[in-house]
Amino acid sequence: MTKKFGEIVALDHLNISIDDAEYLCILGQTGAGKTTLLRMIAGLLEPDEGEIYIDGKLVNGIPPEKRNAVYMFQQFALFPHMDVWQNVAFGPVIQDWDEDRIKNITFEILEMVRLAERRDAFPNELSGGMQQRVALARGIASGARILLLDEPFGALDARLRVDLRTQLRKLVKDQGLTAIHVTHDQEEALMIADRVVVLRNGRIEQEGTPHEIYSKPQSVFVTSFVGGANFIEGTVAKVDDSGAIIEFRGGLRIHVSGRSKRIGENVVVAVRLEDVSIGVTVKDGANNLSGVVETAMFIGDSMEYGVRLENEVLVASRILLSGTFKAYEVGERVTISFHPENCYVFSYPKGGLLKEIEAI
């Protein structure tokens, strides 16, 4: 599918298949084309080129109400003259479900979103987060087989957001629904999706299981956008059966397990923060580089350190707090270590490393 708005190409020859009862997350930064894709599936927009099929049936030109899909907007729109119960029960009522079934599904979903006790409240009596939860509940209760969720947890606080992710996925799976969930939150996508599609500038950058997206990123962009990493610019100095040697600023060298790049090629080596350890001794079989602790930040269950190497490159390390954890002070000399198999090696981006990362 292709969709343009004037000179802006929102979706650029995008091709995707979504399985029945799959929980798919569309992940991408603002402007990637996520909402445009969702609105075209819903029938709120028509593609300039391409076709959309639902259950094998071409739906181009078919109105939204006949697509068996319900779209939950970022700007949720509740019926102001109806209370919470009536808003959630609206879909089942107009579909003429029997009374007991309406009561059961409405109560179950209100319990899920923690609003059963506010069933008699009207939208203007609720906080923005509560209104969003009502909108989510109404969408689930509609009876549609496809849920189109556009940043459904955007207005919720962090704790409730985490709880609802788990409950929403369970409900979708229990009822055999298909969910297409748009988000810019990579943690959210990795937590609940069967499959993740990373969009960038209207094209698919990578798709796969959450584990594949995180552990086998195929570009600098995906590595940075999903999980983050240290990025070291260098040149391939040697390639042999054990991997490759990458030389970077100041003549420092590191060993990587990948052998796909040629000698003399400019590359970017990415290392996840959690794969970088800190100590005062070298580790066997690992890359060991000396430096000085420049920053130390407490971030809840871990500490994040910035270590300035002898060649002035800054490398970050995230250390999980545990009973054996040892704290390091700013100014302390340490050795950072990371294993060759934890290094991702990419060809140097044509537009430069900074532009590739800043695209996020």
Image (tube, rainbow, N blue to C red):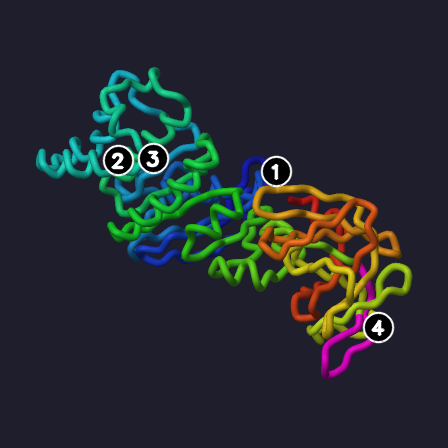
* Quarter placement of the C terminus: top right
Residue 151 image offset from top left, x and y in percent: 45, 38
Q: Earlier in the sequence, mark 4 or mark 3?
A: 3
Relative to 55, is 30 above or below? Answer: above
Identified at 33% across, 16% down, the residue is 125
Specify the label residue 49 is tagged with.
none
Specify the label residue 7 is tagged with.
1
1 vs 2, front mark: 2
The residue tagged 3 is 136
The residue tagged 4 is 237
2 vs 4, front mark: 2
Query: Circle 2 sits in a helix, a strand or a loop, which is it?
Result: helix
3 vs 2, front mark: 2
Occupied quadrant, residue 29: top right
Q: CA distance from mark 1 to mark 2?
A: 46 Å
3 vs 1, front mark: 3
Residue 139 image offset from top left, x and y in percent: 30, 36
Determine whether label 4 and label 3 are within 8 Å by CB: no
Identified at 43% across, 28% down, the residue is 75
